[in-house]
Image: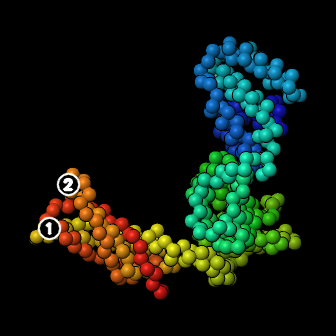
């Protein structure tokens, strides 16, 4: 647990007061990234500070409150209080003093903040705010650090920052409740494919076995089952791959694989020689694409009136799927009166197939010559899956 006299306290109070020099900002950042519990502790302190009273208060009252706080701390613990000061040279010192006072309050909670709670110490209500699109009941959430477990099935989920994760069978992914606040760090046992949401200020870190993976925003596959050497294969972007002690560092580019030899603790870099390394993910992706075609199809259109006042539509349908080809695409058209009152809706079908990543044109004429169509909305309802 930190003591008030520690140097890091000065950095934290300076950060809250907005008084750190650039070199001190870097020093604090390094400390926060060293261990997850550092970031967790700092986040709790920030929350206390943000919920504290308005710092624009009388200076003498601040000194009085600080002395009372020191007295209480002396009676309740062995922590040495931060010495009071008689320097009343301006708002700069007041800011630092107020920040320090609320940090002292945080220290009373230090055992909770700095011990990095175990799952048995936390509420049993999961805090996972992501959305799983899997229909499997094997995807399990545990309280806590938040565990996402894919037992006997393939699953897909999103992390709180928008990062997409595909989980292979028998995979466990966990992260702290403070994920995406200060750092983005997860722990992996098993195999997962990541499409990381880019964030230059908060690197994405994966701890798997004795390996550490660090990225800003890229896509890659990491296989790290127990009793197996962690293996990372990059699909896009660049990824830093290290062993636990950071004695070796590999920078991997697309098409390259990094392997941590678990017995010798050495890192090996080579070209990926397995064209089927993502077959497990493709199975899950294809299952998603054929289950919900409407999620992977979008359209754009423009309209015009012909000589007999009918509305003619010229549109384009886009297929955003990576594996599935669709045909018999049903679209619902809803059109409105000039007063934006719903007048009519019906469904029509575009029969042409559209392959993965492709687009097709279509034309359609509305039977609306007895009315003036002021506004149209068209939405994909569903489609059938064609053989590729």
Q: Residue 29 vs residue 245: left or right?
A: left
What residue appears at the point 75 percent right and 44 percent down from the top-left corner? 38
28 or 71, which is in the foreground?
71
232 or 69, which is in the foreground?
69
Asked whether the viewer can see residue 163, the reply is: no
What residue is disc 1 on? 369
Q: Residue 308 vs residue 377: left or right?
A: left
Q: Within 10 Å of the Cα at label 1, are there few (<14), some (14-19), or many (20+) other Cα atoms?
A: some
As drawn, which residue projects farthest toward the bottom? 387
Vertical comparison of 388 with 85: above or below:
below
Q: Quadrant of residue 330?
A: bottom left
Asked whether the viewer can see residue 353, the reply is: yes
Q: Earlier in the sequence, mark 2 or mark 1?
A: 2
As drawn, which residue projects farthest toward the right? 78
Tell me the distance, in whole angstroms, between the alpha carbons under discs 2 and 1. Answer: 14 Å
* Residue 235: mark in rendering: none
245 or 206, which is in the foreground?
206
What residue appears at the point 42 percent right and 76 percent down from the top-left corner? 383
> Which type of secondary structure does the marked residue at label 2 adopt?
loop
What residue appears at the point 72 percent right and 44 percent down from the top-left corner? 40
Residue 165 place in picture, x, y as percent: 62, 65
What residue appears at the point 15 percent right and 62 percent down from the top-left corner? 371
> Which type of secondary structure does the marked residue at label 1 adopt?
loop
Q: Quadrant of residue 260?
A: bottom right
Residue 224 place in picture, x, y as percent: 75, 70
Vertical comparison of 387 with 179: above or below:
below
Q: Residue 343 vs residue 321: left or right?
A: left
Residue 56 place in picture, x, y as percent: 59, 20
Residue 30 place in picture, x, y as percent: 72, 46
* Residue 338: mark in rendering: 2
């Amino acid at each position: 647990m930190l003591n008030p006299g520690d140097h890091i306290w000065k950095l934290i109070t300076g950060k809250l007061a907005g008084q750190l020099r650039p070199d001190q900002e870097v020093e604090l950042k390094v400390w926060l990234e060293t261990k997850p519990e550092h970031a967790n502790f700092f986040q709790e302190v920030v929350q206390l500070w943000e919920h504290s009273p308005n710092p624009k208060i009388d200076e003498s009252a601040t000194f009085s409150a600080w002395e009372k706080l020191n007295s209480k701390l002396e009676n309740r613990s062995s922590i040495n209080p931060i010495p009071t000061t008689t320097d009343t040279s301006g708002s700069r010192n007041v800011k630092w003093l107020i920040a320090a006072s609320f940090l002292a309050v945080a220290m009373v909670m230090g055992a909770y903040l700095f011990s990095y709670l175990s799952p048995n110490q936390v509420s049993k209500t999961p805090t996972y705010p992501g959305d799983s699109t899997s229909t499997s009941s094997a995807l399990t959430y545990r309280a806590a650090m938040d565990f996402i477990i894919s037992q006997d099935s393939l699953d897909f989920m999103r992390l709180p920052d928008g990062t997409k994760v595909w989980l292979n069978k028998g995979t466990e992914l966990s992260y702290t409740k403070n994920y995406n606040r200060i750092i983005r760090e997860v722990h992996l046992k098993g195999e997962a494919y990541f499409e990381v949401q880019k964030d230059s200020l908060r690197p994405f870190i994966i701890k798997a076995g004795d390996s550490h993976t660090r990225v800003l925003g890229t896509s890659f596959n990491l296989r790290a089952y127990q009793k197996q050497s962690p293996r990372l294969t990059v699909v896009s972007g660049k990824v830093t791959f290290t062993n636990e002690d950071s004695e070796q560092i590999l920078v991997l580019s697309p098409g390259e694989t990094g392997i941590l030899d678990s017995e010798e603790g050495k890192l090996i870099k080579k070209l990926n020689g397995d064209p089927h390394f993502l077959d497990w993910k493709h199975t899950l992706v294809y299952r998603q694409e054929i289950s919900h075609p409407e999620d992977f199809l979008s359209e754009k259109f423009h309209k015009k009136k012909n000589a007999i006042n009918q509305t003619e539509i010229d549109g384009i349908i886009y297929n955003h799927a990576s594996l599935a080809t669709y045909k018999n695409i049903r679209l619902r058209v809803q059109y409105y009166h000039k007063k934006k009152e719903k007048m009519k809706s019906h469904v029509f079908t575009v029969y042409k197939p559209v392959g993965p990543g492709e687009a097709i044109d279509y034309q359609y004429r509305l039977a609306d010559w007895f009315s003036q169509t002021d506004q149209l909305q068209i939405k994909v309802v569903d489609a059938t899956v064609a053989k590729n």
